[in-house]
Image: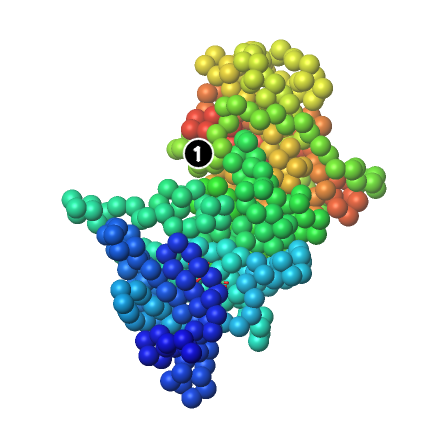
């Protein structure tokens, strides 16, 4: 019989091993039940003091975290003991009987939306708790979540990578240094890869885990949108609702600022997001034609070379100058339109924006390019509104087209990010923020046709555009609308963003 570890633990089998250690299944011979446990051995490399120090810290950290956290929730293994023996470090912890999400996927293939949602809903409170302790897990991935056999609850393991945000490391000058990069490529967001994880880094990793379960694709196998940097994944699954996809998209947004700020927010989004909340705004369609919804509207979109990969709030928005109301005849359209706006403008003219932009053609008002002609772009006051310094910008009309093109392509996170924060936070339009937005655009609207776009005014910082839209709703109805958009020039990202719609 093998000697007992620490005179107490009988190793039964090896569960895994990595660069810094090994994990064993063992039996506690000093407990009456001979209960089984998991022992993690961390092996420092003796001749490398830096690594020795890192491993030692990792060991102590995992033990302390498990002691603190594991006692408070049963979805984190409890710490049973930790000890040092012959220069090696051991952590003894609760054995979670069940299978990792990786094993589950390998056994049963793709998981359904409802199964994945259940996992997220059950895991997010654990993350909320960890984050409330100012701890970032940093290595959430299918391998580190075990579905417990007895109740199917997800249990989070492997706390060797956690970073306590309070425990910033100081360098020799006494300045805080960024933490050592720990995490799994693909599952960790870019800020974490740069050594600066934030709480929403864990939400990103959880979102990537969900995508793996829904699509079977590892993060490296997924494409990204060259214009926005966002990950494109939903076409790999046929059975995910736009609302659920929207929640995951928000979790995995490239920039932390575009993600859910907290685990609770993401949890609420999942709980509310089951299409149970009312439409974005109450609306009565002005006219309804019973024409069938068209097949998926597709618009050629060229990657715009000058477009930055991500969304940054617009800097100091200039004050909005309302233009003349256009087509004021329809008294019902206000609220409806507002929701639309928020939702999505675009349709066809991306072509124009990019064609014009890429060709570096000066945007001479009144000059009609072939693309513009195709898209029925009209400029009402061409000579007066042209801005001499903005000749190589995308046109405001094209920005509106681009907005709706994103919606038609299901890129709701991207279109949402084309709204100014104040429009995003407009509770009349979006009572539940982004959730209301995706509920409307993803849940109820099949596509939007931009039948006409006309420039009302433009200067270096603001523009006003009138658009005629046609909404093809999922219930088969078709609803026309006229909307006046206010746009602001976002110099940082070289694009127009929508600040208002009426
Ligand atoms: N508390 C636990 N209960 C049940 N199984 C566990 C527990 N902790 C780890 N395991 C399993 O042991 C195996 C090894 O896990 P562990 O995460 O410790 O090592 P690793 O993944 O090889 O290394 P790393 O720490 O670098 O991620 C995995 O299959 C994991 O699911």
* Residue at far front of view: 1
Quarter of the figure that contains the C terminus? top right
Is 126 placed left or right of 468 in the picture?
left
Tell me if residue 385 can be seen.
Answer: yes
**Colour scheme in the image?**
rainbow
Q: Is residue 180 above or below residue 321?
A: below
Direction from residue 82 to residue 426 in the image, left or right = right
Residue farthest left in this picture: 173
The percent coordinates of residue 389 (x first, y second) are 45, 14
Crowd around label 1: few <14 · some 14–19 · many ≥20 (10 Å) = many
Rendering coords of residue 268 (x, y %): 53, 59
Residue holding disc 1 = 314
Measuring 53% from the left and 72% from the top, which residue is drawn there? 97
Q: Is residue 211 above or below residue 104?
A: above
Q: Residue at x 42, y 28 (%)?
A: 492
Tell me the quadrant of the picture where the N terminus can be found: bottom left
Q: Nearer the viewer, residue 109 or 337?
A: 109
Residue placed at 53% from the left, 65% from the top?
146
**Residue lying at 47% horizontally and 66% vertically, measured from the top left:** 14
Q: Secondary structure at mark 1?
A: loop
**What is the x, y in percent for residue 192?**
40, 46
Total labels: the figure holds 1
Q: Quadrant of residue 338?
A: top right
Mark 1 close to ligand 1, CB under 8 Å: no
Residue 361 x, y percent position in the rendering: 56, 12
Reply above or below: 42 against 407: below
Q: Is residue 236 left or right of residue 88?
A: right
Q: Quadrant of residue 335?
A: top right
State the residue in front, 251 or 482.
251
């Amino acid at each position: 019989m093998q000697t007992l570890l620490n005179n107490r633990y009988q190793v039964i089998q090896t569960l895994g091993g990595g660069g810094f250690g090994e994990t064993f299944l063992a039996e506690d011979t000093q407990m009456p039940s001979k209960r089984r446990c998991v022992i993690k051995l961390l092996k420092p490399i003796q001749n490398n003091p830096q690594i020795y120090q890192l491993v030692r810290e990792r060991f102590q950290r995992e033990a302390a975290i498990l002691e603190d956290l594991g006692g408070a929730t049963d979805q984190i293994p409890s710490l049973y003991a930790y000890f040092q023996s012959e220069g090696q470090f051991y952590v003894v912890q609760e054995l979670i009987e069940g299978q990792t999400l990786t094993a589950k996927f390998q056994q049963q293939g793709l998981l359904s939306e409802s199964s994945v949602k259940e996992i997220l809903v059950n895991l997010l409170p654990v993350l909320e708790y960890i984050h409330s302790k100012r701890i970032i897990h940093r290595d959430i991935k299918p391998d580190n979540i075990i579905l417990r056999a007895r109740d199917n609850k997800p249990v989070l393991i492997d706390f060797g990578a956690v970073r306590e945000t309070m425990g910033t490391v100081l360098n020799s000058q006494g300045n805080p240094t960024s933490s050592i990069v720990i995490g799994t490529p693909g599952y960790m967001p870019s800020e974490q890869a740069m050594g600066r994880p934030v709480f929403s880094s864990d939400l990103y990793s959880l979102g990537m885990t969900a995508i793996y379960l829904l699509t079977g694709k590892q993060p490296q196998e997924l494409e990204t949108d060259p214009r926005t940097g966002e990950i494109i994944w939903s076409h790999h699954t046929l059975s995910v609702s736009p609302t659920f996809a929207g929640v995951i998209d928000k979790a995995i947004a490239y920039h932390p600022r575009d993600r859910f700020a907290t685990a609770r927010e993401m949890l609420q989004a999942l709980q509310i997001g089951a299409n149970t909340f009312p439409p974005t705004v109450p609306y009565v369609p002005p006219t309804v034609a019973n024409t069938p919804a068209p097949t998926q509207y597709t618009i050629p979109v060229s990657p715009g070379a000058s477009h930055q990969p991500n969304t940054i709030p617009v800097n100091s928005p200039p004050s909005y100058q309302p233009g003349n109301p256009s087509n004021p005849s329809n008294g019902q359209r206000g609220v409806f339109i507002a929701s639309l706006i928020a939702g999505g403008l675009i349709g066809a003219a991306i072509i124009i924006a990019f064609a014009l932009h890429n060709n570096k053609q000066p945007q001479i008002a009144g000059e009609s390019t072939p693309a513009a002609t195709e898209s029925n772009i009209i400029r009402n006051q061409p000579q007066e509104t042209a801005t001499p310094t903005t000749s190589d910008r995308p046109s405001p009309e094209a920005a509106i087209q681009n907005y709706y093109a994103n919606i038609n392509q299901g890129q709701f996170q991207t279109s949402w990010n084309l709204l100014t924060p104040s429009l995003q936070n407009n509770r009349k339009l979006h009572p539940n923020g982004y959730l209301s937005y995706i509920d409307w655009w993803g849940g109820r609207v099949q596509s939007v046709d931009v039948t006409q776009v006309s420039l009302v005014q433009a200067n270096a910082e603001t523009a006003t555009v009138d658009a005629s839209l046609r909404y093809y709703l999922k219930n088969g109805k078709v609803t026309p609308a006229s909307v006046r958009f206010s746009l602001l020039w976002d110099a940082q990202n070289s694009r127009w963003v929508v600040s208002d719609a009426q």
